[in-house]
Image: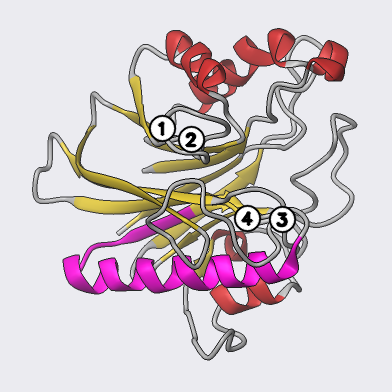
Amino acid sequence: MKVMTFNLRVDIPEDGKNSWAHRSKKAASVINKHRPLIVGTQEGLLRMIEDIESELADYRWIGQGRRGGMSDEFCAIFYDHNELEVLESGQFWLSVQPDVPNSISWESDFPRVCTWGHFRFKKEPYNEFIHYNTHLDHISQQAREHGIHLISKRLDELHQEKNLPVILTGDFNSEPDDPVIRFLQGDITLLGSTAKLNDSFSQTDLNPGCTFHNFKGGNEGAPIDYIFTTPGVQVLKTEIDRSQIDGAYPSDHYPVISIMKW
């Protein structure tokens, strides 16, 4: 199966030629190009998500806005509805009140959320998995660390309860040497807890290069967008799509794509 994470870059008219009006079809075409089974997106407003959905005949999506309901940015998960059905889904806020919409903690600049879905293959009803998708705060290190700690705790609880593979995608706003990433990899303890997930970049070169490029392109730097899995999921290949479409980039982030099996 193929999994993608893709920060869409929120619609800001001040972006000029890089505003969403000029990028919507490009963003959708990247998804159509790779045909992933499932896509974790970040920064999509409702109108942006609907624009993408209108271009992707085979995909549906789940998620809520970070302010609650349909308001503000989503961490929407798109999935190929020909292949998958949603058995259960939900969303929680990265705060001390995770089940309260629009809640905010730990000096986070905005409310932050994690959207998740429990999926089953239609053609293989015995084959199921869980997908978590998030966008950690871009300002507060405290918010990033507490947020990923909360995600790890809930992910592990559901993993143990359902005994299913779990995929975690997102924009973590953290480079590989950051405590957030080292915690997920099992290298350090964070807030008294440990985690042990597989980093899909372990199947690439030692330095995969940047995933955020601010519409400038290039590969200098380090990634901040990741795909992680629980042990038992084998990542066969991971790539960063740095291509342009008609001379422009579909986002200020490159999408990351992994092929995996279990």
The answer to whether residue 131 is left or right of residue 245 is: left
Magenta stretch bounds: 140-168
Mark before the other along the chain sequence, 4 or 1: 1
Q: Nearer the viewer, mark 3 or mark 4?
A: 4
Q: Nearer the viewer, mark 4 or mark 2?
A: 2
Residue 128: x percent and y percent? 20, 51
Mark before the other along the chain sequence, 2 or 3: 2
Q: How crowded is mark 1: few (under 14 residues within 10 Å), some or many (20 or more)?
A: few
Q: Does the magenta stretch include residue 165?
A: yes
Q: Does the magenta stretch include residue 104?
A: no
Label disc, if present, on residue 173 of the rendered structure: 3
**Distance CA(mark 3)–CA(mark 4):** 6 Å
Mark before the other along the chain sequence, 3 or 4: 4
Tell me where residue 202 sits by quadrant.
bottom right
Residue 25: x percent and y percent? 61, 10
**Distance CA(mark 4)–CA(mark 2):** 15 Å
